[in-house]
Amino acid sequence: MTPEDFAALLTPEGSALLDSLRDYDPAQEIAVATRLRREHPAALVSAALGQARLRQRAVAKFGAQDAHRMYFTPGGGEMATRASVASYRAERLAALGVRSLADLCCGIGGDALALARIGIRVLAVDHDPLTVAVARANARALGLADLIEVREADVTEVDTAGYDAVFIDPARRGGKGVGAARSASVRGGGRATGGRVFDPESYSPPLSWAVATARSAKFAAIKIAPGIPHEAVPAEAEAEWISDHGDVKEAVLWFGTAPGEIRATLLPGPRALATADPLPDPQAGPVGRYLYEPDGAVIRAHLVAEVAERLGGRLIDPTIAYITADELRETPYATSYEITDVLPFGLKKLKALLRERGVGILTVKKRGSAIEPEELRRKVKPQGPNSATVFLTRVAGAPSMLIGSPTTGP
């Protein structure tokens, strides 16, 4: 989509056409396009259909009410902060007394909109003309243009001295890694990837520039990839990993808040687990009656030990981020399961057990196993009215299967 195509969508004709496509079925796109081209220019129809598809995809991230009023670029919608996360961050900034903020690398404006909605004045900056036009249109569409100034500029040349805080969301494009990822460990989530750690210096702008800019502000937040190595976190920053309904969405480096603190924040809530002095990895021991699967933000923040201590638990393996315990305790930081069977890995054994118990609804989870869930389901062919959860993992270094089901609470 070119800036000219987008500008056409903002005309009365373009707006009306886009509104008419709110509930259209993409499977019928050819027929819809053929009909609309009888009354509208072909380029406008193509732009409207593309935008309608982007709005439908954005409903999961922004909610239907906002998504169907907003505008998106293909990449911008994918990279934008989820509305729930942006709102949480905006509220945290407001609690710090922030009343004005420079949003550098603003993209389509998702964070700027959340900030403005709670009364923070925002300078939103991006270097891409189309992205800037989309961000400006979103501010108008949601009635927040009076609080959001959108500027097309190189973010490295913007003077942020007059603002209470700076928020930086660098583009995280593919690039060379900084070295082989650590072998599977509790602190790495128990997954032996053998891949390469994403290099923060390949961000655009690089993380080093973002950190230098953050240090010059009273308060600052830098959005980073959740997989950033802890060694790359500056000593004076607070590092926060955020999940929403169990899915890790992002990590943030905070400046001017709690230097050296590590935080796992779970949405909705928020519920936060934080420490400036992380515990050492827990000891491993035999599988007990209950298994706890820590939230992804807890694992990324390397706070599994803190959760294990609260649960009176232990690890099932020194390299796997599953906690086991003999008693059931309630925690918001992990999902609990009652374990009925602990078996050496074997498809024949599993298939026979599932058939014996009439399990047709099988949830497969894995950590430290090369077997993919869909591959396992295909091979064991579960049938029957009952349900179960199987964990493909390691226990004391040996490939194992744990069978159980979610608990209903203590």
Image (cartoon, helix red, strand yellow):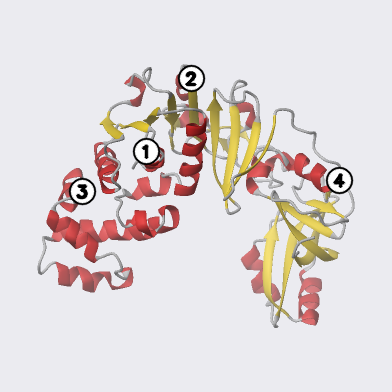
Q: Say what secondary structure mark 3 lies in.
A: helix
* Label 1 close to label 4 by CB (< 8 Å): no
Nearer-N-terminus badge (1/4): 1
* Label 2 close to label 1 by CB (< 8 Å): no
Mark 2: amino acid = Lys
User: What's the residue at 32%, 72% (across, down)?
Assistant: 27
Rendered view: 239 above or below 226: above
Nearer-N-terminus badge (3/4): 3
**Residue at label 3?**
6
Q: Is residue 111 visible?
A: yes
* Label 3 close to label 1 by CB (< 8 Å): no
Nearer-N-terminus badge (2/4): 2
**Residue at label 4?**
284
Alpha carbons under labels 3 and 2: distance apart: 37 Å
> Which mark lies nearer to you, 3 or 2?
2
> Which mark lies nearer to you, 1 or 4?
1
Q: Quadrant of residue 30?
A: bottom left
Q: Say what secondary structure mark 2 lies in.
A: loop
Dot 3: within a 10 Å radius of its alpha carbon, few (fewer than 14), some, or many (20 or more) residues?
many
Nearer-N-terminus badge (3/1): 3
Q: Quadrant of residue 308?
A: top right
- The dot on residue 218 is 2
> Which mark lies nearer to you, 3 or 1?
1
User: What's the residue at 41%, 44% (across, down)?
Assistant: 80
Nearer-N-terminus badge (3/2): 3
User: What's the residue at 59%, 45% (across, down)?
Assistant: 270
Alpha carbons under labels 1 and 4: distance apart: 48 Å
